[in-house]
């Protein structure tokens, strides 16, 4: 896979996640009904992009195994979300928390691989990995928030994940060995 293709895929996935996040924030009352579909599809696309990029460039990318792990977990959670709509609506803070904690930790560990290889910009991934992990833990502390508050929190989570994906696209040329 070319560097340009991986950049474009990560940026598209990021934009998709940001749009889904804005949609959650704009329609908090309706978010509960469409949440499993919006959340599940956005996660599925993000996970598929990570796996495709791993498959096409794992021999040439630093920390590629973390992209694969993040992609697989994201797809598994998205399948669960898409298949269990009402359960997802009732447990969304826990599902998001699990996703964000794992994703944040994988980005944090990957940032240290990037630092070891002398990649400039690795600190952004460290900061975002920490932020995603902290926000994931916070989602476990208040699971019964109101629907409007949860829509804003979920929208923020999706936007953060989208920003990370766009940054991956912007910095992806630095990942290639």
Image (cartoon, rainbow, N blue to C red):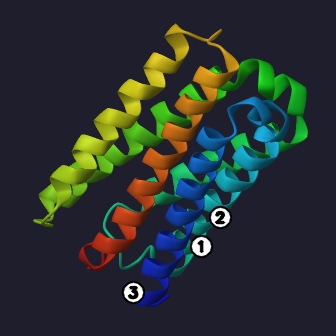
Residue that carries the numbered disc 3 in the rendered image: 3
The answer for how far apart the CA atoms under marks 2 and 3 are is 17 Å
Residue 88 percent across, percent down from the top left = 79, 28
The answer for how far apart the CA atoms under marks 1 and 2 are is 6 Å
Residue at x 52% of width, y 20% of height: 139
Residue at x 55% of width, y 31% of height: 152
Residue 70 percent across, percent down from the top left = 52, 50
What element does badge 2 sit on? helix
Q: Is residue 137 above or below residue 63?
A: above
Residue that carries the numbered disc 2 in the rendered image: 48
Classify 10 Å Cα crowding around label 2: few (below 14), some (14-19), many (20 and above): some
> Camera-side residue: 24 or 175?
24
Residue at x 42% of width, y 27% of height: 135
Q: Are marks 2 and 3 in contact (CB under 8 Å)?
A: no
Residue 130 percent across, percent down from the top left = 29, 34
Q: Are marks 1 and 2 in contact (CB under 8 Å)?
A: yes
């Amino acid at each position: 896979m070319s560097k340009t293709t991986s950049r474009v895929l990560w940026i598209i996935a990021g934009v998709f996640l940001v749009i889904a996040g804005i949609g959650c924030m704009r329609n908090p009352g309706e978010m509960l009904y469409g949440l499993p579909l919006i959340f599940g599809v956005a996660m599925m696309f993000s996970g598929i992009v990570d796996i495709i990029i791993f498959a096409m460039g794992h021999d040439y990318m630093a920390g590629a195994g973390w992209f694969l792990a993040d992609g697989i977990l994201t797809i598994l959670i998205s399948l669960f979300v898409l298949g269990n709509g009402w359960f997802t609506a009732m447990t969304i803070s826990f599902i998001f928390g699990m996703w964000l904690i794992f994703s944040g930790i994988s980005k944090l560990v990957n940032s240290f691989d990037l630092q070891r290889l002398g990649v400039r910009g690795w600190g952004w991934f460290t900061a975002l990995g920490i932020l995603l992990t902290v926000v994931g833990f916070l989602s476990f502390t208040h699971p019964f928030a109101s629907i409007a508050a949860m829509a804003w929190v979920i929208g923020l989570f999706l936007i953060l994940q989208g920003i990370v994906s766009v940054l991956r696209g912007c910095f992806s040329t630095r990942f290639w060995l």
